[in-house]
Image (tube, grey):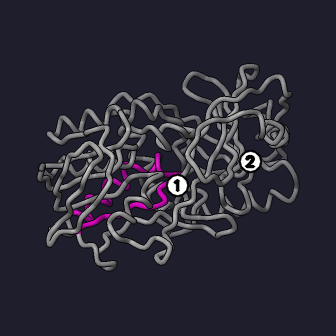
Amino acid sequence: MEKVKILIIGAGVIGLSIAYELSKNYEDVVVIDKEETFGRHTSSRNSEVIHSGIYYPRNSLKAKFCLEGNSLLYQFAKENEIPFRNTKKIIVATKQSEIKEIEKLMGNGKINNVQGIEFLSQEECYKLEPQIRAIAGLYVPSTGIIDSHSLMKKLEYLIEENDAFVIYEMEVIKIECLNKGYRIHFSNGEIYETEILINSAGLNCEKISQKIGIDTIKNKLKIHWCKGEYFKSNSISGISHLIYPVPDPDGIFLGIHLSVNLNNEIRFGPNAYYVNSISYKMDDTYKQEFIKSVNQFMEISNKNIHADDTGIRPKLQGKGDKFRDFYIQEESPNGFPNFINLMGIESPGLTACLSIGKYVKQLCNNLN
């Protein structure tokens, strides 16, 4: 049986960021993941966008960590030669009724202290992106894209440089609460005891909370899996900005948008719908939905768009629910001291990862 100071469950970008921060100051830090390598789910199946913080309610964790994380991520990428690009973004209004929504977003962005945002006229939109249809727009200069695989690979390297460990193919099957700390049993027969346990298990975070004894239904911590699909086009070129529609009014996602990856390929997506199982299969079921959505802001034909990839988000917000924030809490109030629980870490989790890592380190510092 191994004894460690801190055990982190989940080696996605959040778990790795937490371990990176903790390994600077703590000994005996271990990250485990049931998969054979890092970031096999939400962390590697997304738009790889560095968000600005413009969408989220004032004083929410999503707003706070996104804004802080934006600058931290750009800085980290520069210092560690992680491929990225400050593409900037235009949120477009394609009909008169959407201009008010653009204005609301601009106001919210200013409240959240998002720097450099500007309202664009139709002429200004056309000047920046001649292929895009818009009657107005919102210019967001802090948005960009990043190579999430290279980011996680670098975090893993730095964690191990700090004498911490990342161990794969370790699936949690049982968690026991001790007088001080926790005993974790794994499917391969390994047993670990830890003083501090951190749940950053992404899609499986609810299962970990339940294994420790938290009633996720009673505590309103049920996780809803929300799937999103991406389509790609090889027939479009010459677009440099990310192009977003006015976001979904239910707040489930930001709308089917156009992104440019680091290979200058054009992607559209994601859409959003709830699922009961984790499967990354996709077909052309939603292709016409994509074409209809994209054609609101640029011309695309059926033959010029094809299936690309899918991802699934762990959302606290269920169907018909209002906005739900990140849940990040040390669970002493619920009877589980030294258990730091991260639930519903979806978008803008990639952008917020380094900021979340710093926040969790502070929670650990407060336990000592």
Residue at horizontal 21 percent and vertical 47 percent from the top: 30
**Three-letter amino acid code of the residue under disc 1:** Pro
- Please, is residue 261 above or below residue 356 in the view? above
Classify residue 108 by image quadrant.
Answer: bottom right
Residue 166, x across and y down, in percent:
25, 39
Residue 147, x across and y down, in percent:
47, 31
- Please, is residue 191 above or below residue 283 in the view? below
- Please, is residue 309 above or below residue 90 in the view? above
Instruction: Return the mark for residue 193.
Output: none
Q: Which residues are magenta?
A: 338-364
Residue 24, x across and y down, in percent:
18, 47
Residue 179 shown left or right of residue 360 in the figure: left
- SS class, disc 2: strand
Residue at horizontal 36 percent and vertical 33 percent from the top: 36
Disc 2 residue crowd, few under 14, some 14–19, many 20+, Cα 10 Å: many
Q: Identify which residue, 356 or 43, lies in the foreground.
A: 43
**Three-letter amino acid code of the residue under disc 2:** Pro
Residue under numbered circle 2? 245
The quadrant of the rendering that contains the C terminus is bottom left
Residue 316 shown left or right of residue 165 in the figure: right
Residue 289 shown left or right of residue 4 in the figure: right
Residue at horizontal 29 percent and vertical 78 percent from the top: 335
